[in-house]
Every structure is written in structure tokens, then in C-alpha cells.
Amino acid sequence: MKLIAALVLFYPLIIPVWKNGPLNGDNTMTPETRPFLTEPEVRTQFELFKEIADPSVRSKMVFELVRSNNPAAVPLMTRLLDSEKDPLVKTDLLKAIFNMRKIKACGKTNTIKRFLNDPHPSSRAYAAALMVDNSFDLDSVLAALRKEKSKFVITLAFKELLLTPDAPAENQLLELLESDDPLLAGETAGVLAASSKNPDEIQALAKIAEDQRLTVRSELAASLAKRKYGGLSLLSTLAKDENSSVRAFVASSTPNAKRLSLYLELSKDIDWEVEVRRLAAISLGLLDDPKSIASLRKAIADTSAPVRKAAETSLIALSPSEKVLNGIIANELAEKTSRAAAVTVLGSLKFAPAAPEILKILAESKNDDVTLRSIKALGQLKYNKARAKVMKRAESRNPSIRSAVAKTLGVFAEKKSFNTLLKLSDDKTATVATEAVKAMGVTKSSFFNTRLLRALKQMRSSAEIRSNACWSIAKTGNTPAAALAQLERLALEQVIPAMEMMEYDSDFVRISAVLALVDLGAKSPAAKEKAARALEKLTSESAAGEFEAEIAGDTLKEFARQAKLYMNGEKKIPQTPYPTTKPTLTATRMK
């Protein structure tokens, strides 16, 4: 079995994000710190383990070894199995070895095999799964499963069988397929369906497809659904199953052209189960065929909102021809049941001929959903003739509509709408105000300089309004001295009032301020000087500030490193591995 190296995590690259829009807590989020122990530290734990008498402490040590993320721990834990007396610790060791199997395989050893008959179900489960994972004596595993009663053991073992490339031979599984235990029969059917070159040729599976036990049919359907090809006859039978969960597996099966007829049938409204129709709509979106598009056009008028949403997403993904889009204008856009989805499809595909009709819909709409979609679509279409109608919706009670108005007016970038954007930037709903501040940057107009400077100073507001203001100032290209000074202050000083002290702003705000100075520095020597000074301080050794707070933590230092390379004209910025930490070690602490 091929071994998989331990995952290496990296800090996010922020420059591509910055070029596309403002930074925030989500698009600058760093991964969770990955614990790691060196090989000598792992060996030390191994030696300490043998000295600890308390089994509860040994159990804690086992999972600390798992968190070491070092493959050296696996053979050592396998050795510990031979000498361990406590049954629960043995189970913990087996589970630990199983959890580390993607880092290092435990190897072919009789140490694992003897646990197939262990009194504890968990031990039997992990032993069987490890033997399957290592393709080690599958005959013994299958023999043990024939008499197994534990659902956990059967499920875990067969889950590994589905993942291994060395599945048992077909004749080894057919006997298990006849089991009276529906779970064992179903899991076996799943492995056969996954591993067979042509499952339609296995007569026993045709019988299983009509088995009265739902568990058995469901496992077969789930396994067939994951295949790229094959099993069409079996899937056709299962597509007519009386149970909606079985049909749902068929509807979500890996799309290929030969399965198109199944998706078309399952997408029809006569099937009362919403999830089946929704999944069929998703599958149709992955098959570029006139029949798929025709079916999806019907589905955007479905009685269920999730189905309509899936259908519109699929239509957008297929990007139909101009002829089809004109047909959507003439038909689906005119019908109330499909109008909202049709607006989104036409706007997302930037089909300009639809703009006048969508504007009419906006003018007449009394439905919030249709109104919201129309405003977004008109912005996507950059249909400036809609400015006046869009501005009127700035008074809506719905904050989502007001946010959409702000975004669309930013795209239009017309002076007649600038006062509306100013008003929206003071909206009582933070998301609306933040969107309006971002829209100011999209207009690239110096008209908003005063308001953007005020946004930079709104220390008691959401951090995102300040990061958006940084981005917008960079986009306008204007460099009033007061704005440059405030950007530098955000980057380097403690500006946020907290109780009776001051704190640094969020990392994404601070690096946004620096990047704004970098961008403005392309034309302004003063901005360039401030950017260079800020980056020098942020990338230097930690400078102790007030209350012994560091001027920059590891994450901000890394972002500053990237910003420095960006300022120096580097086109490709290398990623930096995210640091590991040493996990807390129970035995070491006790010693």
C-alpha cells in the first residue's frame, strides 16, 4: 500500500485575495496549528509509556502519539500491543494505529490478526480495518465477518474494503451476499458493486436490487452511484425504487451520458420527493446536452425552492446558447413561477438582451426575492439605465436589498447615485454599510475621500468596514495626507478601545492598511515611504509595545512578508509552511 506523507499546512496567500476584493476574517483565516513531535521525542514517549502503571495515563499517551503526526509512532505503537495487558488500552492502541494509517501503514503482522476474535467490538473493528487496509489475509477478515454481530465492526471493515484497491475476489464475497443480516449483505453488495468490472453481469446483484430489505438496496445504490461507469441496468432498476433515499442515490450518481435518461426521469415533478429532484437537477448540470437544458428550464419553475435553486445553478454552469437564452426571456422570464430563477440565470450569464425586461420586472416587483435578484442581475449586466429604479430600492426595509443596491450602484459608478451610496454607508445594518464602503472603491471616485477617511476611524464599528475602506482608498488612487496617516496608524498602533486599554486592530485590517499604502505608493512617494516603514517594523524581530503586547504576531509577520515581496514587484510569492506545535505530553509532565 502506498504511504501518504503527513499533511503540510501553509499560510494563506493574501495578494490574490486583495486584488479581487477586501480582506476579511474568512479569506485570511490561518489553519489550525498542527501538532508535531520529532522522532527522538516519539521514542522518549515510547520508553516512558512502558514505565507508567496507570492505564488511564497510558491511554492519554496513546492519543498524544497520534497527535505527534510522526510516522515513527506507528511501529512503536504496534510493538506496545504485544506487551500491553489492559484491554481498553489495547483498543486505544489499535484505534491510534488506524487513525495514523494515512501517514504510515502498520505493516503485515500477526499482532493485528489476533484481535479479530477479541471480546471488545472496537478492537475487532480496528483490527479488521487495519488488515484490510494492509491487504493482509483477507480470508481471515471475511471469515471473522461471517460470524460478526456488531454493526460498528461490519461497517468499519467494509468501509476500508471499499477504499482498498485489493478487494477480495468475487467468489469470496458472494457467500456473504446471502447473509440473513441485512447490514452484512448490504455492505457486501456495496463492495461487489464497487470492485466488479461490470456489476450488471453479477446475477446476485440483480436480485439484491429488488431485495425487500431497504438497508441492502441502499448500500447497493450508494456504491453504484460512486462509479464513473457501469451498473446502468442496476441503476435503472433502483431509479424506480419505492423508497426516495434509494432513488436519491441514483439521482446523485456520478454523471455520464448513458445515465442521462435516469436523471431526466428523476427530475420530473411527478416524483414527490424534493431531494430526488434537487439531486437530479445537479447531475443534469454536469451533462451538456440539449435534453439536460430543456429539463432544467422546466425545473426552475419547480414547486420547491431548493429544486429551483439547483436548476438555476446548473443552467448557469451549462451556459446555454443565445437561442436558448432568448427562449428563457420569452418564456421562463414571463412566468411568475420561473421568473426569479430566470432573472438570476440571465444576469449571471451576462446576457445583455435581457436587461430591459429585467428592468421592467424590477419596476413592477412587489416580491423581495424577485427585487433582490433583479437588482443583482442589472449590476451584473452593467445596465446603467436602471440607475434610477435601483436607487428607489435603497429605501427598502430588507437589508439584503439595500446591500444589493449599494453593490450595483458601485458598478454603475454614476455621480447621480453617489449621495445614495453615502446614505447607505451610514446604514444601521453593518452589512449594508460595509457593502456601500466597498462600492465606493469600485467607483474609483475621489468623491468619497471624506467618507472613507471617516470609515477608517470608525473604531467601534465592525472591523470589516475598516478593511473595506482600506481597499476602497487603494482603488480610488487618491492620497490625502490624513488618509495616509490613518492607514499607517491602523497598521502600527493600538487603536481599538477595549475596557480601560487600547488594542491592535484585527490582523486583516492592519495588513489591508499596509497593502493600501503599497498600492497608493505606486504614485505617491509619501505613501511608498509609509508602506516601507510599516513593513520594516512588522517584519523585524518583535518589538514590545504597551502592556508587553507584540507589534506583530506570526500571522501578521507572514502577511507583511508577502506584502513586502508584492511591493518589490515579485510576481510569484512563495508560500510559507504553517508552524507546528508540540502537543502537551502527560507522561513528561508527570515525570
Image (cartoon, grey):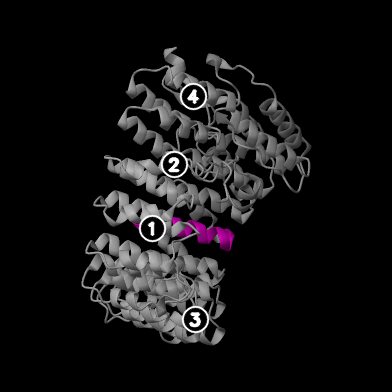
- Kindly identify the amino acid type of the residue bearing the numbered disc 4: Phe
Mark number, residue 46: 4
- Kindly identify the amino acid type of the residue bearing the numbered disc 1: Glu
Residue 413 is covered by the magenta coloring: yes
Nearer the N terminus, badge 1 or badge 4? 4
**Nearer mark to the viewer, of 3 and 4:** 4
Q: Which residue is mark 3?
A: 257
Image coords of residue 45 (percent x, y): 49, 22
Residue 555 is covered by the magenta coloring: no
Q: Residue at x 41, y 21 (%)?
A: 499
Nearer the N terminus, badge 2 or badge 3? 2
Dominant secondary structure of the magenta stretch? helix
Q: Real-space Cα distance between discs 3 and 1?
A: 49 Å
Q: Is residue 3 left or right of residue 91?
A: right
Image coords of residue 169 (percent x, y): 44, 65
Range of residues picked out in magenta: 396-415
Mark 4 surroundings: few (<14), some (14-19) or many (≥20) residues within 10 A = some
Nearer the N terminus, badge 3 or badge 1? 3
- Kindly identify the amino acid type of the residue bearing the numbered disc 3: Ala
Nearer the N terminus, badge 1 or badge 2? 2
Mark number, residue 202: none
Q: Is residue 220 left or right of residue 451?
A: left
Secondary structure of the residue carrying tag 4 is helix
Q: Residue at x 51, y 24 (%)?
A: 503
- Kindly identify the amino acid type of the residue bearing the numbered disc 2: Asn
Secondary structure of the residue carrying tag 1 is helix
Q: Real-space Cα distance between discs 1 and 4?
A: 68 Å
Q: Which residue is mark 2?
A: 110
